[in-house]
Each structure stands twice: as C-alpha cells, then as structure tokens.
Image (cartoon, helix red, strand yellow):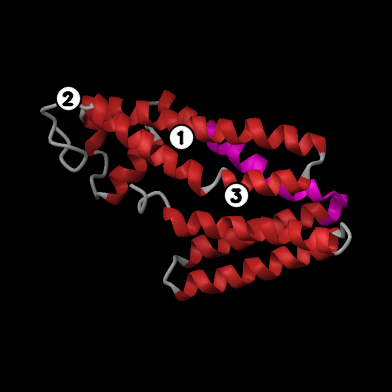
Amino acid sequence: MARLLGGRSAAVDATLPPVAFVAGWLLANQSVPVGAAAALVVGALVAVWRLARGDRPRAVVLGMLGVAVAALIALRTGRAVDFFLVQVASNAASALAWTVSIVIRWPLLGVVVGTALRQRTQWRRDPALLRAYSLASWVWVGQYVLRLAVFVPLWWAGAAVALAVARVALTWPLIAACLAVSWWVLRRVLPADHPGLRHPRV
C-alpha cells in the first residue's frame, strides 16, 4: 500500500523545497525572493533526481509546478507564509475529494488499490470490499483535515518557520500512520473468510 500511494521517498522529496524556502528566507534576512529562488533550485534538483531514479515524468512536472506556483504566490504577496497556500488549498481539495468519493460509493482508496491491482471495477461489486474501502478512506480524510487544522492557524498567525516544521512533521510520519491505520481498518472490517484485496467476491 505504501508503494501504491506514493511511498516514503516521494513524501520526503516534497518537503525539501518548503524547507529550502524558509531556510533561504531566514538566511537572507527574511527576503522572500531569496527564499523563492532557494525553493526553485532545490525543487529543480529534486525533479532531476526523481527523473533519474525512474519516477513518472508527469508526477515530476506536477511537483515542480507546485513549487513554482507557491514561489510565485509568495513573490506576489511579499509574505513568506503565502508560500504554503498551495499546500493548504491542496489539502482542502483532497479532503473534499476523498469525502465525496465515499459519499458516492467510489472510495478513492479502493480506486487507487483496485486500479493498481488491475481489478477495474470488480472490487465495487464486492459489498465487503466496498464497505472496507469506504471506512478506510475516512482515515485519509482525517489526514487532510488534521493538516488543515494545523496549517491554517499557523498561516493566519504568520508563522513561516512553524509552517515549515509542520510541513515536515505532517508529511511522511502522518502518511505512515495513515497507511498503518487504514490497513488495520481494512483487515478489521473484512470478514474472516474473505479471500483478501486481490480476490474480490463477484
């Protein structure tokens, strides 16, 4: 599941540009342009590294685009904390998307895992799997809501350094926790005689 949902390396890579932004901002006497330049340089290096290790070009481009948009927003407003607005918006959008997917009975955890296992829509025709994926997907909704509960007050308070720290703390450690809890939910909810995620009952 960790591999299917991005893995540790992708999560760690995503934290490097924000840390570089805040580090450059602090070292240059709170200069937003220097912070933005540092984030873009580190983002570009991360992109090259990810391409070299075989990551999908589309994912790499989207990651670099996110860094560029965050830098442009901060440059436009002149506020260091606004570099994190993209992260705030993406977490809000993700929380909404995962919630809607559960409500319409297309839980995103099932979509991701089912697609990776080449099951197409077979998992949805298994009531036990559909219920398990739906309940486990709420764990991921909670992840995004928790981030918002931390990020938004820090952004409102103008705490750029604290936002960078929170960005690191609430990336891979939180994803690891979500993986563990959602896997536990799946195993707990599925009947004891169910053949497992790879074998939907259809």
Magenta residues, start to end: 75-95
Judging from the image, what secondary structure is the residue with disc 1 in?
helix
**Callout in the foreground (3, 1):** 3
Residue 112 falls left or right of residue 93: left
Q: Position of residue 101 (x, y in %)?
A: 43, 31
Q: Is residue 115 above or below residue 126?
A: below
Amino acid type indicated by mark 3: Val
Magenta stretch: helix, strand or loop mostly = helix
Q: Quadrant of the C terminus?
A: top left
* Quarter of the rendering containing residue 112: top left
Picture coordinates of residue 52, whole percent (x, y): 47, 76
Callout 2 amino acid: Pro
SS at badge 3: helix
What residue is shown with label 1? 140
The answer to whether residue 105 is left or right of residue 45 is: left
Quarter of the view holding residue 139: top left
Residue assigned mark 3 = 168
Q: Does 91 lie within the magenta span? A: yes
